[in-house]
């Protein structure tokens, strides 16, 4: 849509800024994508926008170009694509002000035994805050354990916790540990990635499970981050973010931000703006984090690049991995696609010479891969579905103090036996569970209490 500029002084760089505009009888929030002296809309029908909402661009030029491309490629309205890139608070016109939310233990909340015995999450949060001196930014705590959000509400209601908003620069960067000890294959991969810094270069990091890909990411970004650069790393699941975040912060000793949909809105906006302002050197998130603005981009990483979780299935249906490659091209930075089982398209691009193919063929630290064997049970007697060789192997491991885990795809021929004429169901008279039919034995068994 075309509008006349709002009254008042315009930002120095208006493209990428938000404006409040009239829409029908109401109002809406829009993003300036272009400024022109003429419009195809007749002058007498152009309406002036109401006000500027930003003093500097919320969406940088490279992100606007990426979203415009995605709108055309995925056949989705450009306005809706721009809205997809922003946290909901900013989409609704919230001011782009930064204020970090902190949790503080009260005097009562710092006492031993203040938390109820039946509240393990509250106890975890209390102990974490005590280790951090009684206070910590909410975003950092929720990056470790999202379930602490509900525990904090209960503690605040009980007077054990209080919330404060502080300037975003409060708190020192984490202390860096000793330099990483890398093996030969890891060092070669790090050197190749470092050699690509400052230019667009797609790299496929093909490393077996446990080969230390995260250490490669951290070591490769060390030089760029030390000079003020930023690294964006995408993970397929929210559960993977805390462990990777902890390792990167430990190795790099820099401030980091986590961006994903499960964060409370205030924390998500704060992390998003910290990345835009360049205050967060490492940004970790799920697929939507590919739209995070970066002030000083240096490296983009897509961990587990083969995972289907990078494909958005509603709204703007996009592939975060593919958009990460496109965005790296527009930013002029290398993009690393890491996986133990690379996707077929990535392998194809590597074989065609489009991607640099780096390999980590062995586990780091001398760890050995698990031994895998197939046991033919066609001629063996089974007791409860378990053969004698498997039972003997289990006994050996238990005697050595190890653990054994069985995965059973199914026990029994049918999980329930019912009469279709009268509706009778075979139930266990001991525990009220339903009996499972074992057809080979001609028995009905309860898998809860063992009744047969």
Image: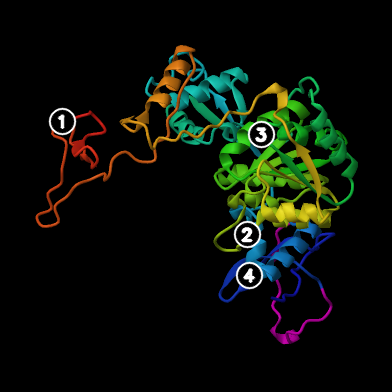
Whole-angstrom CA distance, mark 2 to mark 4, is 11 Å
Which label sits in the foreground, 1 or 2?
A: 1
User: Quick one: label 4 or label 1, which is nearer the N terminus?
Assistant: 4
Pick out the residue farthest to the left: 422
Task: Kindly identify which residue carries mark 2.
Answer: 84
Whole-angstrom CA distance, mark 3 to mark 2, is 25 Å
Q: Is residue 281 visible?
A: no
Secondary structure of the magenta portion, mostly?
A: loop
User: Quick one: label 1 or label 2, which is nearer the N terminus?
Assistant: 2
Quick check: is 416 in the magenta stretch? Answer: no
Read off the magenta span. Answer: 36-54
Residue 144, horizontal then vertical, whole percent: 58, 31
Task: Kindly identify which residue carries mark 1.
Answer: 430
Question: Which residue is pictured at 48% across the width and 13% down the height?
Answer: 401
Q: Is residue 53 left or right of residue 425?
A: right
Labelled disc at residue 244: 3
Task: Kindly identify which residue carries mark 4.
Answer: 76
260 vs 381: above or below: below
Q: Is residue 95 visible?
A: yes
Tell me the quadrant of the picture where the C terminus can be found: top left
Residue 49, horizontal then vertical, whole percent: 70, 70
Q: Is residue 152 left or right of residue 280?
A: left
Quick check: is 42 in the magenta stretch? Answer: yes
Q: Nearer the viewer, residue 9 or 363?
A: 363
User: Mark 3 and 1 residues: CB-CB less than 8 Å, in contact?
Assistant: no
Residue 90, horizontal then vertical, whole percent: 64, 55
Pick out the residue farthest to the front: 379
Q: Residues within 10 Å of mark 3 (few under 14, many from 20)?
A: some
Question: Which residue is pictured at 81% across the width and 22% down the height?
Answer: 179
Q: Could you say whether the residue bearing mark 3 is in a helix, strand or loop? A: helix
């Amino acid at each position: 849509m075309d509008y006349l500029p709002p009254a008042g002084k315009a930002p120095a760089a208006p493209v990428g800024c938000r404006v409040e505009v009239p829409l029908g009888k109401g109002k809406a929030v829009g993003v300036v994508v272009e400024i022109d002296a003429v419009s195809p809309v007749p002058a007498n029908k152009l309406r002036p926008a109401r006000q500027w909402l930003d003093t500097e661009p919320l969406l940088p030029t490279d992100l606007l170009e990426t979203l415009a491309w995605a709108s055309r490629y995925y056949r989705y309205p450009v306005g809706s694509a721009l809205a997809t890139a922003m946290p909901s608070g900013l989409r609704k016109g919230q001011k782009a002000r930064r204020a970090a939310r902190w949790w503080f233990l009260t005097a009562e909340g710092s006492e031993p035994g203040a938390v109820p015995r039946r509240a393990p999450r509250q106890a975890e949060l209390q102990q974490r805050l005590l280790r951090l001196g009684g206070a910590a930014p909410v975003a950092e705590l929720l990056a470790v354990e999202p379930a602490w959000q509900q525990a904090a509400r209960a503690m605040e209601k009980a007077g054990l916790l209080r919330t404060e908003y502080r300037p975003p620069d409060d708190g020192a960067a984490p202390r860096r540990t000793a330099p990483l000890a890398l093996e030969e294959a890891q060092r070669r991969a790090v050197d190749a990635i470092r050699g690509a810094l400052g230019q667009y270069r797609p790299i496929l990091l093909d490393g077996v499970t446990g080969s230390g890909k995260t250490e490669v990411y951290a070591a490769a970004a060390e030089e760029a981050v030390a000079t003020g650069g930023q690294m964006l790393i995408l993970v397929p699941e929210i559960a993977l973010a805390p462990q990777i975040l902890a390792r990167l912060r430990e190795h790099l000793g820099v401030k980091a931000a986590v961006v994903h949909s499960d964060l409370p809105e205030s924390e998500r906006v704060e992390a998003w703006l910290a990345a835009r302002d360049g205050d967060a050197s490492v940004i970790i998130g799920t697929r939507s984090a590919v739209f995070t603005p970066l002030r000083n981009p240096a490296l983009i990483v897509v961990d587990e690049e083969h995972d289907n979780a990078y494909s958005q299935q509603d709204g703007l249906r996009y592939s975060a991995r593919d958009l990460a490659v496109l965005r790296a091209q527009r930013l002029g930075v290398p993009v690393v696609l890491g996986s133990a089982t690379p996707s077929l398209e990535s392998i194809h691009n590597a074989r065609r010479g489009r991607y640099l193919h780096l390999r980590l063929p062995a586990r780091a630290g001398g760890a050995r891969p698990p031994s895998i064997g197939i046991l033919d049970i066609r001629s063996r007697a089974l007791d409860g579905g378990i053969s004698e060789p498997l039972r003997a192997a289990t006994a050996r491991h238990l005697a050595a103090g190890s653990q054994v885990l069985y995965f059973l795809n199914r026990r029994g021929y049918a999980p329930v036996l019912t009469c279709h004429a009268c509706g009778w169901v075979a139930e266990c008279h001991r525990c009220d569970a339903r009996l499972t039919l074992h057809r080979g034995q001609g028995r009905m068994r309860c898998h809860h209490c063992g009744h047969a």
